[in-house]
């Protein structure tokens, strides 16, 4: 059956008890089936000052701005404290193999997904660096190997989706020509294994640091970028001063830490292997596998 998109399929298979197994913002059918009372109750619970962050950035008069904020928002009452306590996921000790079918695609894809530590952990930052090392730019390890040299893949990408309770580390690839998805899995696993068993070169390490410095400066080069960063740092980390410290944190990550985190969280027996296929490949035999 062609039901969920690729992101939903990854979450559905990777999470068993945590709400992350569903889409974060819900689906249109949820909205269609909700009652007016449910909409009002949701708004009353979550759309309150103690569950919001307001960031004002620019060439402002601070005292005047604070007065305006009080004038516009001061009368809105504080809501009840929101308690968030979600179930813990059991460890993944055996590779999860799954298939999904999409009527809107013509080329299959392989998704290798791992459940990884939450966004405010140093491990999440290290995984960001591993993603960049593997797939950011034409000289990255996976792109150079699969797309440029061996011409096995149309596209390859690695990224860490950082969330509040758990993150999801994903490596995806689209095959070129007659390349099998199993072959892409082998080639990708080989590169991940290298990170787990060998230190990346000093040259690649320096390149990573330069890439993160460039990205940080770029994302905070505008007033809007600074405002977004401040809001994120306060919301998820409780520390707006991270805008002055985050780059140093990334620069403090060592080659040894990159190897250690890859070895700990990117094991083959801890991942989902999702074959994402066009619906035209759907057969009764495939459905039974």
Image (cartoon, rainbow, N blue to C red):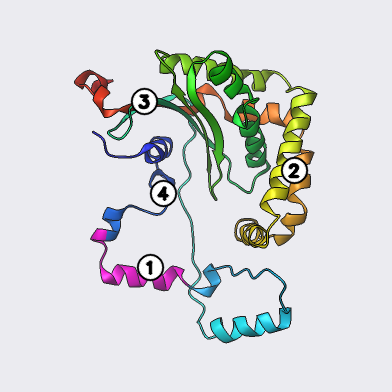
**The N terminus: image quadrant:** top left
Q: Quadrant of residue 213?
A: top right
Which element is circle 2 on?
helix
- Relative to 60, residue 262 above or below: above
In the image, 184: left or right of 222?
left
Task: State the CA–CA distance, disc 3 to disc 4.
Answer: 30 Å
Residue on which the image places disc 2: 213
> Which residue occupies the extreme left position in the image?
284
In primary-sequence order, the first of circles 3 and 1 is 1
Question: In the image, which disc is placed on residue 19?
Answer: 4
Which x, y percent locates residue 116? 55, 37
Image marks 4 and 1: residues in contact by CB distance under 8 Å? no
Residue at the (54%, 13%) spot, across then down: 150
Which element is circle 3 on?
loop
| Neighbourhood count class around disc 1 (C-alpha, 10 Å): few under 14, some 14–19, many 20 upward | few
Question: In the image, which disc is placed on residue 107?
Answer: 3
Q: Quadrant of residue 197?
A: top right
Residue at the (65%, 57%) spot, across then down: 225
Which element is circle 4 on?
helix
In primary-sequence order, the first of circles 3 and 4 is 4
Nearer to me, 33 or 247: 247
Task: State the CA–CA distance, disc 4 to disc 1.
Answer: 17 Å
| Neighbourhood count class around disc 3 (C-alpha, 10 Å): few under 14, some 14–19, many 20 upward | some
Residue on which the image places disc 1: 42
Which x, y percent locates residue 157? 53, 30
Q: Is residue 275 on the magenta stretch?
A: no
């Amino acid at each position: 059956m062609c039901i969920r998109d690729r992101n939903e399929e990854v979450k559905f298979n990777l999470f068993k008890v945590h709400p992350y197994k569903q889409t974060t913002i819900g689906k249109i059918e949820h909205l269609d089936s909700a009652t007016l009372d449910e909409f009002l109750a949701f708004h009353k619970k979550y759309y309150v000052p103690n569950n919001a962050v307001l960031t004002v950035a620019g060439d402002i008069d601070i005292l005047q701005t604070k007065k305006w904020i009080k004038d516009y928002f001061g009368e809105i009452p504080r809501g009840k404290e929101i308690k968030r306590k979600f179930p813990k996921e059991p460890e993944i000790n055996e590779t999860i193999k799954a298939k999904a079918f999409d009527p809107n695609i013509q080329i299959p894809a392989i998704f290798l997904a791992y459940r990884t530590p939450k966004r405010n952990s140093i491990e999440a930052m290290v995984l960001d660096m591993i993603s960049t090392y593997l797939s950011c730019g034409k000289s990255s390890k996976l792109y150079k190997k699969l797309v440029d040299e061996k011409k096995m893949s149309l596209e390859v990408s690695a990224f860490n989706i950082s969330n509040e309770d758990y993150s999801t580390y994903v490596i995806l690839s689209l095959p070129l020509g007659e390349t099998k998805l199993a072959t892409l899995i082998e080639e990708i696993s080989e590169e991940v294994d290298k990170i787990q068993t060998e230190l990346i070169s000093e040259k690649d390490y320096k390149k990573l640091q330069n890439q993160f410095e460039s990205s940080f400066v770029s994302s905070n080069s505008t007033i809007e970028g600074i405002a977004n960063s401040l809001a994120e740092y306060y919301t998820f980390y409780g520390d707006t001063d991270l805008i002055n410290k985050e780059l140093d944190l990334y620069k403090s990550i060592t080659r040894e830490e990159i190897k250690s985190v890859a070895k700990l969280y990117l094991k083959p027996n801890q991942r989902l292997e999702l074959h994402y296929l066009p619906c035209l490949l759907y057969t009764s035999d495939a459905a039974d596998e």
